[in-house]
Image (cartoon, coloured by chain):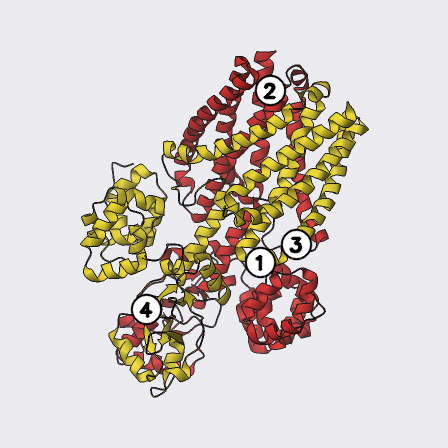
Chain colours: A red, B yellow
Amino acid sequence: ESDNLDPIEDLFRDQLSVADMAHLLESIPSRLRDVLWGYIDEDLQGEVLANLHEDIQQGILKRMSPEEFVETTQDVDADDLADLLQQMPVKSSSQALLLMPHDSRRKVEGLLAFPEDTAGGLMNTDMISVRADVTIETVLRYLRKKQLPTPFDVIWVVDRESRYLGSLAVSKLLQSKPEQIVESVMADTPQAIPATADEEEVAQIFERYDLVSAPVVDESGLLIGRITVDDVVDVIIETADHNMMSMAGLDEEDDPFAPVVRSSRDRAVWLGINMATAFIAAAVMSRFEASIAQIVALAVLSPVVASMGGIAGSQTLTLMIRGMATGHITRANLSWMIMRELGVGLINGSLWALVIGSITVIWYGELSLAMVIASAILVNICIAVLSGTLLPFFLKSVDVDPALSGSVILTTLTDVFGFLTFLGLATIFLL
Amino acid sequence: ESDNLDPIEDLFRDQLSVADMAHLLESIPSRLRDVLWGYIDEDLQGEVLANLHEDIQQGILKRMSPEEFVETTQDVDADDLADLLQQMPVKSSSQALLLMPHDSRRKVEGLLAFPEDTAGGLMNTDMISVRADVTIETVLRYLRKKQLPTPFDVIWVVDRESRYLGSLAVSKLLQSKPEQIVESVMADTPQAIPATADEEEVAQIFERYDLVSAPVVDESGLLIGRITVDDVVDVIIETADHNMMSMAGLDEEDDPFAPVVRSSRDRAVWLGINMATAFIAAAVMSRFEASIAQIVALAVLSPVVASMGGIAGSQTLTLMIRGMATGHITRANLSWMIMRELGVGLINGSLWALVIGSITVIWYGELSLAMVIASAILVNICIAVLSGTLLPFFLKSVDVDPALSGSVILTTLTDVFGFLTFLGLATIFLL
């Protein structure tokens, strides 16, 4: 297929937008990516680069000299430029900074001062602000001369010292009389976002107040930039991807089309961790080998006990991780949550204890075995929902990502306690 | 705590925005919700209602008469009103429609014609459009008289028959000369979205082209509404929530603070399905009871084989579900994906076969047992990654949600094949 690339050339030259090119590059194996990259118009390569996944950016940036980088990215916005520089080796990025025109360099260095995952790291500096004491006519005249950023829905109002005061929607601007003073028509919303705010907090603010753009201020209230909704959408998608992917031990920034060896390496660690936990559970089970040798049904039924706990626990864990991410579940309602989940555990534990006990009676015809497995199911489901509730809070308090490690730890707990209660009770009551 | 609600009254009357009130209502147990609802100013109840989760909306709407509903929601936007009506019993919603003022009713009925999860269901009708052959001055005069929607960043340009032609950014409008003709300054982007487009497709378009608003057209190209980014953000969050939650058998619209009985019921079905699959695996294992009775180590090591397959498979499945959702993985690159995953399965399968084989030798001191478990691990991991790749495509082609049923089916496969290969090989070679 790679012999005849002319249709691709046509496609890239005339039909695809920058975003489409990035999407296409992300959807093909990494080997083919290098070939296609050469077909992208040099004037567009910078924009395409800014639209790619971090992992893929790193691959392309690795093969670029600092000179090429500066040449390629001259039309890229300062905020994207700052993000790209952070994907480069420190040596290349500082060389690239030195090669940049003075103006862009100052802007980018200002942005690099903020961590990537804060409001400061998300913001751009190409915003329009006006003083509160000028007339609408002055504002309109000023806007005619400026380069206006996209999206352009609102401008910021500041005082003499550049402190943020409020906003003036463009719709308001168009409907005000020329002689009116900005102060008399401006709104005092949205509230300014501190540059140090976490990016997920920013996303929650945008979502809650349906914002398109928001002002960012430094610690003394000076307006230093604005965040636009397109960057917030990226944060929302990344966060969601992170929560989903890390529950399977994957990194949302990893290239889904990475070659075999790299993909294998990326996933091996997770398999190793899970192997360790599987052997912990196996070690618990092996303590009861003597019981199993006498009643082989125990071997057959043990995985059922462990798996019911695992499922019940992962339901609670998922609910908690999502509720904590949206801000609905906090320390304030944790104790209510614990009681509710314990209630759910008791009800569902009893229900499925009864069902599984009945199936066991029918299958093996032994009432005592059925009672042992029923008790073990009830205990394990209760332990599972309790762990599912408390674990994410505990992990967060020791600064460990619950989405990443929660499910492994939980499964280990439900396996170990499942085997322990079932085989323990069996050893006591059936032998 | 519920005795002294005065501070709550203060909070609700003066300090909280509509979005904050909705967030607060969503973060408390359902019993307390009814109490707090009464504290919300009646003029705001409609807006708060529109901001709530569907599950919670239903709870509140159930207790509202059609008269109350129309009274409460008179300030709510037509698109939100259409969504709310769809949460009511059909009888109440048709009564409510009859009680509405003629104008709102016509608007809402127009929107109700579109399924909720399409562009038509997402759009609003309060947009501004101008003809291509008028002057900028005319446009500015027209805008002074209209009620302008939020966000207001761009207006649509149409021909005499109201067919969509392109857009005029407000920034462009502010910088054009009064005598210029709209046609000469308008842009031909964004492309119009057909009313029948799926909401996830809409989200991908907004994300890819960084849109704030987009025009919606009917099948003959007539402009019938616009979609704004705030509604798209909700779609993105819902989709992400859906993918994450349904992997644990949860519904993203379920109230996370539902009372014990309702939560138990919501989760019982999932536990039941998983119990069934656990018993399928147990039934497979029980075919080998004679082998287990002779070599108890088989019972201890079986769950390890099953769990390694489950982990490897769920990594692939997660990667596939996410890639299919973002549009990166399609039928076009599926065969490449299968080969890559098979490669990953062979490498990681061999690696962990070696590790687990070695652990088995050290633990049980039996080389033949180690070779049997190593082979079973390799086979099961390969089956797992293959199933993880093909399953979501197969499920989608028969219109079943891969995020919901993928993981159950996958775990069943890896459990069954894990037990089958390990215990089968053991029976052949060790007895």
Per the image, label 3 sits on a secondary structure element best described as helix
* Residue B154, horizontal then vertical, whole percent: 38, 72
Q: Mark 1 points at which residue?
A: B328
Q: Is residue A135 visible?
A: no
Subunit that carries the residue with mark 4 = B
Q: How far apart are marks 4 and 3 (CA)?
A: 45 Å
Per the image, label 1 sits on a secondary structure element best described as loop
**From the viewer's perspective, is residue A25 above or below residue B165?**
above
Tag shown at residue A423? 2
Of B18 and B335, the residue lying toward us: B335
Q: Residues within 10 Å of mark 2 (few under 14, many from 20)?
A: many
Q: Is residue A16 visible?
A: yes
Chain-order first, disc 3 or disc 1: 1
Residue type marked 3: Ser
Q: Please give left or right for residue A81 compared with residue B336 in the image.
A: left
Q: Which of marks 4 and 3 is in front?
A: 3
Quick check: do tags 1 and 2 share a chain? no
**From the viewer's perspective, is residue A315 above or below residue A90?**
above
Taking the view exactly as shown, the residue that stands out farthest to the bottom is B179
Q: Residue at x 29, y 82 (%)?
A: B138
Chain-order first, disc 1 or disc 4: 4
Tag shown at residue B127? 4
Quick check: do tags 2 and 3 share a chain? no
Q: How far apart are marks 1 and 4 (CA)?
A: 33 Å
